[in-house]
Amino acid sequence: MNKDLWDRCVNFHGHECPGLAIGFRACEIAKNKLNLSFSTDEEVVCVSENDACGVDAVQVITGCTAGKGNLLHKDTGKMAFLFFNRETGKTVRLILNQLPATMNREERQKYILEAPEDAVFTIGRPKFTVPEYARKFNTIVCEQCKEGAAEHKIRVHDGKKLCLDCAPDYEMHW
């Protein structure tokens, strides 16, 4: 384990925890399997299936960020991370295996960081191809609140262009 890199992740996240260890270990495995380096643009893409602590390690280690458009959130609620190397076409999906329930917090973190990778994660391939590059959208001014929003987040309701805050929800109630 790269102790300096772990310390940088802890510093960014604010504390040590098993959740941070999950993202750290997933990144370390992905780096080795896909020959990844720090992404200065969109060379590497990570799709996280959760919004938990491990995502902070992904940002520090891979350079994937929401702002660059190469850190995407697919909310399945699973502790899974998908990595794509655009330059080589290689991909990997890492999903956390069930950990022994008898472990305390410190034991859990140590296990995640030190156990064999296939004991910690099920390692497979994503079920979809690399997401497209980040797109730029025009700004549309909401006709109700007069605030600008990206055009793909605008809804048309009664002929008016409305932002998501102003547009009524459309849900089926059975």
Image (cartoon, rainbow, N blue to C red):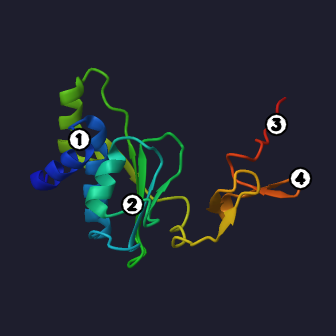
Q: Residues within 10 Å of mark 1 (few under 14, many from 20)?
A: few
Residue at position x 61%, y 70% from top? 137
Q: Residue at x 69, y 62 (%)?
A: 141
Residue 60, quarter of the rendered image = bottom left
Q: Describe the element under mark 3 as helix, strand or loop.
A: loop
Q: Which residue is mark 4?
A: 158
Q: Earlier in the sequence, mark 4 or mark 3?
A: 4
Gap between marks 3 and 2 measured at Cα: 34 Å
Image x and y of residue 150, in percent: 63, 63
What label sits on residue 65 in the rendered view? 2
As measured in the structure, the alpha-carbon distance from the residue carrying label 2 to the one carrying label 4 is 37 Å
- The image shows residue 7 at horizontal and vertical percentages of 14, 49
Mark sitting earlier along the chain (2/4): 2
* In the foreground, 34 or 164: 164
Say which amino acid is labelled 3: Met
Q: Nearer the viewer, mark 4 or mark 3?
A: 4
Residue 76, above or below 46: above
Give the mark nearest the N terminus, 3 or 1: 1
Which of the two residues, 13 or 126, is positioned nearer the viewer here?
Answer: 13
Q: Which residue is mark 1?
A: 14
